Amino acid sequence: MTEAAQNLTDRFDNAYDRFLASLPENTYAKFDGKRWHLSVNSAEPLNPTEEIKFEKLKDWLKKRMRHIKLPQLLIEFDNDLHLTHRFLPLT
């Protein structure tokens, strides 16, 4: 095993050991012996005024949200940042 692979294995093992040690107090993930159960991070409930503002914000965002396919988004991203030009031949 290479030194890099061993380092990553050691780091993963340490992280997993810390996770298992904290499992009894973990409020986000529980294991019942058969499967994992993940909790939902519930937000504070909104009052009626905040709820109206939130709905208006969602509607505003929905109207302005572009529908774009991933390949087109990646092309636009590359056109702006020019990341892939380093992988093209010099000629």
Image (cartoon, rainbow, N blue to C red):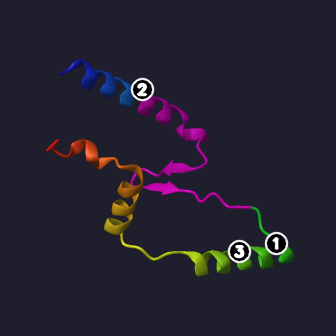
Task: Please report contact status of discs 2 and 3: CB closer than 8 Å, yes or no.
Answer: no
Residues shaded magenta = 14-43
Q: Tally the marks.
A: 3
- Amino acid type at mark 2: Asn
Specify the quadrant that holds the N terminus: top left
User: Circle 1 sits in a helix, a strand or a loop, which is it?
Assistant: helix
Give the residue pinned by disc 2. Answer: 14
Q: Nearer the viewer, mark 1 or mark 3?
A: 3
**Is residue 34 magenta-colored?**
yes
State left or right for residue 88 relative to residue 74.
Answer: left
Looking at the picture, does residue 44 appear above or below residue 64?
A: above
Residue 72 place in picture, x, y as percent: 34, 68
Residue 55 place in picture, x, y as percent: 72, 78
Give the residue pinned by disc 1. Answer: 50
Between disc 2 and disc 1, whose residue precedes?
2
Residue ID at (47%, 35%): 20
Q: Count neighbours of disc 2 (C-alpha within 10 A) and say few if under 14, some if 14 to 19, many if 20 or more.
A: few
Task: Please report contact status of discs 1 and 3: CB closer than 8 Å, yes or no.
Answer: no
State left or right for residue 19 relative to residue 46.
Answer: left
User: Circle 2 sits in a helix, a strand or a loop, which is it?
Assistant: helix
Q: Nearer the viewer, mark 2 or mark 1?
A: 1
- Amino acid type at mark 3: Leu
Between disc 1 and disc 3, whose residue precedes?
1
**Is residue 89 magenta-colored?**
no
User: Circle 3 sits in a helix, a strand or a loop, which is it?
Assistant: helix
Q: Which mark is residue 57?
A: 3
Looking at the picture, does residue 10 appear above or below residue 79?
A: above
Residue ID at (45%, 77%): 67
- Amino acid type at mark 1: Glu
Residue ID at (55%, 35%): 22
Between disc 2 and disc 3, whose residue precedes?
2
